[in-house]
């Protein structure tokens, strides 16, 4: 009998602690996926609106401020993730999910009402906090309601959501920006958030809680360390890499080292180092950090290239991602089933290799004269790679976690993904500004102030600058491609999962 969302699984979930006999986990997972889908759509939808926000709120003069619309969200997303996972263990994933969903939905309305770049960044920070409370709970529910041998299939749904969101986000964003304005990429979250809240209240179970003490020193050390490192990277180019910037970055690294040391001493650590005794969990975290770096790092330069150099509207720019989303969504279910049977190094290794090749290919063909089909081919290959990364990698990371640490493990995994995303956003933002200034200087004979100055203020580029801008975006995309190469090497060291051993 097929194992899908409309039929009962062939196992008895009642055998898992805290679940009644005959409990069906799929409806609850679908309900949680609605909220997770909204978070992912929000990330991709904003990348399409970047140019409109840049022009409307800064008159094309403050690229760094617009980058902070994404970086501020990601920073606020990543800092509370460890705490959110632990709170899910303490108070139940359903409660934390609903609180986070409420914060996310209300702050989305605030984003749409923002009239300045500073207010928008502040609203995005609050939105990131809501997303942080929601995200670990989805994976924790999978870990706590699906037996280890079936989690790959469940994670396939989780992974396919990423592929669909990659399509829906930019397409919806393009239509909304073209027809109603950039504000509506945030307003659209309100009705979706309300529907997700109702579905979660009805379908998600109240799972057993576990008593923990909050690790206050760990919370403060991790938050301060992550903030200093990310803020330093983001502001480095703007401040000409001054001594103060380097001091900030070094201080952040030191605090993170102290945080890890403290976790080995704390009675109730925020991030239990025992999780990392499982080799596959440790390696999966390293790989997902690279994936987060790549996804965030390539999205903004790709959308800016499509709109500035190719001259496409936001909607037509988003249409470039159709092959990625369709192929990724179509292959997610088969890859999830294979994740329960095939060694993870083969599946994820193939996925990272395909994705890396696609991004290097995209960087090579990113020219203002390249036809649309020349961009669609590498994007399609990215879809193949994505299908064999998201679900299989998440299943490998969480398959052997003890149930009482499911929330904490999910928090760690999602934190490392978002750390990679934050670093990707910050690093690519720095590289992108540098490349724009360098390429424009070569084309015009003088430096391009503010990453483009008046040439950017109208939203359109003079014909003679479209080529240099394309070169700048293509060079920038090489950085996230290199991160995928690192991930490919990492996953080659996966051990055989316990459920696959004789």
Image (cartoon, helix red, strand yellow):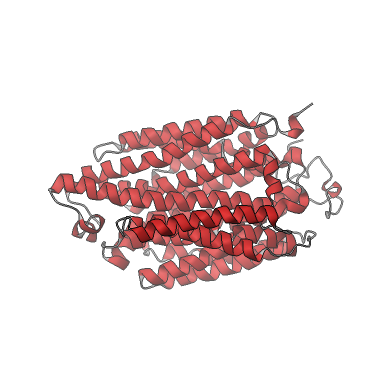
For image coordinates 26% across by 49% down, the residue present is 436
Closer to the camera, 75 or 40? 75
**Rendered-image quadrant of the C terminus:** top right
Question: Height in image: 436 above or below 231?
Answer: above
x, y percentage for residue 113? 42, 73
The N terminus lies in quadrant = top right
Q: Is residue 373 left or right of residue 14?
A: left
The residue drawn where x is 75% and y is 50% is: 144
Q: Is residue 169 found left or right of 317 in the rendered image?
A: right
Q: Nearer the viewer, residue 226 or 502?
A: 226
Q: Estimate the x, y position of residue 441 in percent, counting from the top left.
A: 18, 48
Number of marks in the rendered image: 0
Q: Examine the rendering and report whether any part of residue 138 can be seen.
A: no
Where 287 sits versus 29, above or below?
A: above
Note whether 182 is above or below 396 in the view shown.
below
The percent coordinates of residue 182 (x first, y second) are 38, 63
Foreground pick, 464 / 234: 234
Q: Residue furthest left?
A: 445
Q: Residue at x 49, y 31 (%)?
A: 353
Q: Position of residue 345 (x, y in %)?
A: 61, 30
Q: Is residue 212 visible?
A: yes
Quadrant of res 269: bottom right
């Amino acid at each position: 009998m097929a194992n899908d969302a409309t039929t009962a699984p062939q196992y008895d979930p009642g055998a898992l602690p805290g679940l009644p006999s005959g409990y069906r986990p799929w409806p609850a997972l679908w309900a949680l996926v609605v909220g997770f889908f909204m978070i992912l759509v929000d990330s991709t939808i904003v990348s399409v609106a970047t140019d409109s926000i840049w022009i409307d709120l800064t008159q094309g003069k403050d690229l760094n401020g617009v980058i902070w619309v994404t970086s501020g969200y990601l920073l606020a997303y990543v800092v509370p993730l460890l705490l959110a996972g632990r709170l899910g263990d303490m108070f139940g994933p359903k409660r934390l999910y609903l609180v986070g969903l409420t914060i996310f939905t209300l702050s989305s309305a605030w984003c749409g009402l923002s009239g300045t770049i500073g207010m928008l960044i502040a609203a995005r920070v609050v939105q990131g906090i809501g997303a942080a409370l929601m995200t670990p709970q989805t994976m924790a529910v999978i870990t706590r309601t699906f037996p280890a041998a079936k989690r790959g299939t469940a994670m396939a749904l989780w992974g396919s959501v990423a592929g669909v969101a990659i399509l829906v986000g930019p397409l919806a964003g393009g239509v909304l920006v073209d027809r109603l304005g950039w504000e509506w990429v945030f307003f659209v979250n309100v009705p979706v958030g309300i529907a997700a809240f109702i579905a979660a209240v009805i379908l998600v179970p109240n799972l057993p809680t576990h008593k923990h003490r909050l690790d206050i020193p760990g919370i403060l050390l991790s938050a301060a360390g992550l903030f200093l490192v990310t803020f330093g990277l983001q502001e480095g180019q703007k401040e000409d890499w001054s001594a103060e910037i380097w001091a900030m970055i070094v201080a952040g690294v030191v605090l993170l080292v102290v945080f890890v040391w403290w976790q080995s001493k704390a009675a109730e650590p925020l991030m239990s180092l025992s999780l990392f005794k499982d080799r596959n969990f440790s390696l999966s975290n390293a790989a997902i950090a690279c994936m987060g770096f790549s996804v965030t790092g390539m999205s903004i330069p790709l959308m800016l290239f499509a709109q500035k150099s190719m001259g496409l509207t936001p909607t037509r720019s988003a249409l470039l991602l159709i092959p990625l989303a369709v192929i990724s969504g179509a292959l997610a279910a088969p890859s999830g089933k294979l994740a329960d049977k095939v060694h993870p190094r083969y599946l994820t290794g193939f996925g990272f290799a395909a994705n890396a090749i696609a991004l290097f290919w995209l960087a090579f063909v990113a020219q203002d004269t390249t036809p649309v089909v020349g961009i669609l081919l590498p994007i399609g290959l990215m879809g193949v790679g994505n299908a064999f990364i998201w679900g299989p990698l998440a299943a490998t990371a969480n398959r052997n976690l003890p149930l009482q640490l499911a929330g904490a493990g999910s928090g760690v995994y999602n934190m490392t993904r978002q750390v990679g995303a934050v670093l990707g956003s910050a690093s690519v933002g720095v590289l992108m500004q540098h490349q724009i200034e360098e390429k424009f200087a070569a084309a015009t004979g003088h430096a391009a102030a503010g990453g483009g100055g008046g040439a950017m203020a109208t939203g359109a580029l003079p014909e003679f600058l479209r080529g240099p801008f394309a070169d700048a975006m293509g060079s920038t995309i090489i950085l996230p491609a290199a991160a995928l190469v690192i991930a490919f090497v990492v996953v080659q060291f996966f051990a055989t999962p316990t459920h696959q051993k004789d």
